[in-house]
Image: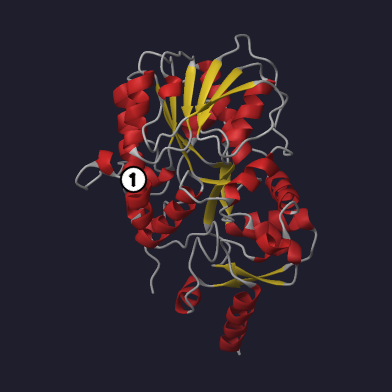
Amino acid sequence: MATSRRDVLKLAAAGAVGLGLPPGAKHLAAAAASQTAQPAAAQPAAAPVKPLRILILGGTGFTGPHQVRYALARGHKLTLFNRGRRPQEWPAEVEELTGDRNTGDLKALEGREWDVCIDNPTSLPFWVRDAGQVLKGKVKQYVFISTLSVYAADRDVDADETAATHEYKGADPMKETMESLQKNMELYGPLKARSEREAETWFPGITTIIRPGLIVGPGDQSDRFTYWPLRLERGGEVLAPGDGTDTVQIIDARDLAEWTIRMVEKRVFGTFNATGPDYRLTMEEMLLGIRAATTAGAKLTWVPHPFLEQHKVQAWSHMPVWIPPVPDMIGFSRRLVTRALEQGLTFRPLAVTALDTLAWCKTWPPERREKLRAGLTPEREREVLAAWKAQQE
């Protein structure tokens, strides 16, 4: 079972959609509540010269609460628009408006004006269209949080924002729903790309498109990074994928959130890849960095990609963060972020992200820690390691 770009993108999309607004995502309420104890800023939040009126569509999911707290610390006035299903305590006054973009209920936004709108949760083009119909001419900047999954190919190393994006090939992008997306995760990249174009149609010249990579840290319910701090903290022999030299890219949700707020303070427009770090990070360096933070003394056993495939251990899901260097995926974790760095994107140390993630995990109930949504179970890991050792004899 060869690793394919299609398989990896399906898994990436499933995780991203799981962090959106599908009905029944009850675990997100607990995640949002637990995030309130997390530090908001990587650097002192000096008040900007001019406070902004910021509208955040969403605001209570993964990155949204970090945006809110950081913006409040910098003196901005915040309005949140969402379904009101994940209430939070904020450190200062926040206006909260209730509506449902899935049903077209945006009445609470009518007749209002803001300096900036940050659109966090959108995966569907009609959500952008509906927001555009209400907010066109009512905001001075529209920030659309997109994804690196919009790119049509991952064959090229060090590709930048000019690389080709997906084209939607269905019947009507405006009729796609969360249900249709959940049934066909291959739509995720094309629908995000189509949403970007919709944003530029409704807010020409004042659109900022941010394309994050894998977002990690406290609050991430996908466990696509969280697996590694928890596994390394447990100690013992750890199955590690590949040979350690494969490149990985991640960004702490707080770094992404804080940089987004600084971008609106400067009114920067355009399209930006947003992932990290600002150097080439290998899988081995990431795991050793996390291990050093946990001090548990875990031992890494590197297992080659062909053997993992033979034993049905999937990249990205069973071995989170990691993508093997197969031809059509070689550039997946090698996207250039030069434009974002030039606009002040900064990164917390890996150890800080790992330790804060572990601290957040300690707030989970025991049953949540025992059933991670990514990675291998202890039993499966031991089974694969035993098979690998047997082959070496």
| Residue 116 visible to an observer of this rendering | yes
Question: The N terminus is located in which quarter?
Answer: bottom left
Side of 196 where 361 appears, left or right: right
Q: Does residue 210 sit above or below 147 in this rendering?
A: above
Residue beneath the point at 55% across and 34% down:
84
Q: Amino acid at mark 1?
A: Thr
Among the 4 quarters of the image, the one containing residue 233: bottom right
* Dot 1 crowding, Cα within 10 Å, few <14, some 14–19, many 20+: some
Position of 231 compared to 282: left or right? right
Q: Label 1: which residue?
A: 177
Residue 242 picture quarter: bottom right
Q: Nearer the viewer, residue 335 or 58?
A: 58
Q: Residue furthest bottom?
A: 393
Which of 154 and 259 lies nearest the eye of the viewer?
A: 259
The quadrant in which the C terminus is found is: bottom right
- Which residue is drawn at the image coordinates 79% and 63% (left, top)? 296
Quarter where residue 148 is shown:
top left
Q: Pinpoint residue 257: horizontal percent, then vertical percent.
A: 58, 33
